[in-house]
Image (cartoon, grey):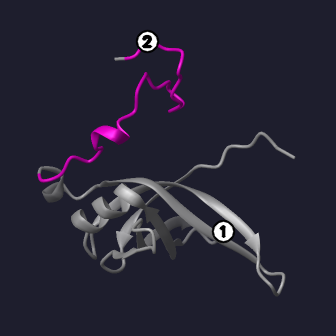
Amino acid sequence: MSTGGFNQLILIGKLGADPSLQYAERGKARCNIVLVCADRFINEEQIAVEQTHTFEIEFREEEAERLHRLCRKGNQILVEGRLSGWKDKAGRSQLKIWGNRFSLLNKQQEEKTNLWPEASQPVGKFHSMGMLTDTEEKE
């Protein structure tokens, strides 16, 4: 049964380790990263609080190879991806983050890399809500 939902995740953080690249039996690339994100807010006592969250994210194929080639521990990146969930054998809920694409946010890296390779370039126009429409005139 489809719920008609929307599954998109955007995270900005720093790489906690160098990306790990592996190849599956069929030669398809997989790259795993650890992304560390800080969440800052004012609590009920009006005290500034910072919480750190760590996310494991997996990229596949060309984007995996690109990530491994361009990124190192400490780089700040933006990740666009989706969540996948299931129950393990013990009945506990498990979540996995699949990365679709990324962008380096470090100034010194910006000049050296094409942040959105041609295959990842968005087509069409963005609305103020950030949504891309297929019906609008292509640029």
Q: Which mark is residue 137?
A: 2
- Residue 73 left/right relative to 137: left
Which mark, residue 44?
1
Residue 24 visible from this viewpoint: yes
Q: Nearer the viewer, residue 14 or 138?
A: 138
Residue at 54 percent of width and 30 percent of height: 129
> From the viewer's perspective, is 92 left or right of 13?
right
Q: Is residue 115 left or right of residue 56?
A: left
Q: Quadrant of the C terminus?
A: top left
Note whether 54 is above or below 2 in the view shown: below
Determine which quarter of the picture holds residue 47.
bottom right
User: Which is more N-terminal, label 1 or label 2?
Assistant: 1
* Residue 51 x %, y %: 52, 75
Residue located 17% across and 58% down the image: 109
Identified at 50% across, 24% down, the residue is 127
Q: Residue 128 got which mark?
A: none
As displayed, is residue 123 above or below residue 46? above
Q: Nearer the viewer, residue 64 or 109?
A: 64
Residue at the outermost right position: 1
Residue 26 is drawn in which quadrant? bottom left
Residue lying furthest top in this view?
137
Q: Which portion, as a residue range, is magenta?
A: 112-138
Determine the CA span between mark 2 and mark 1. 48 Å
Q: Is residue 98 magenta?
A: no
Note whether residue 50 is visible.
Answer: no
**Residue 8: percent from the left, percent from the top?**
59, 49
Q: Amino acid at mark 2?
A: Glu
| Amino acid carrying mark 1 in the image | Glu
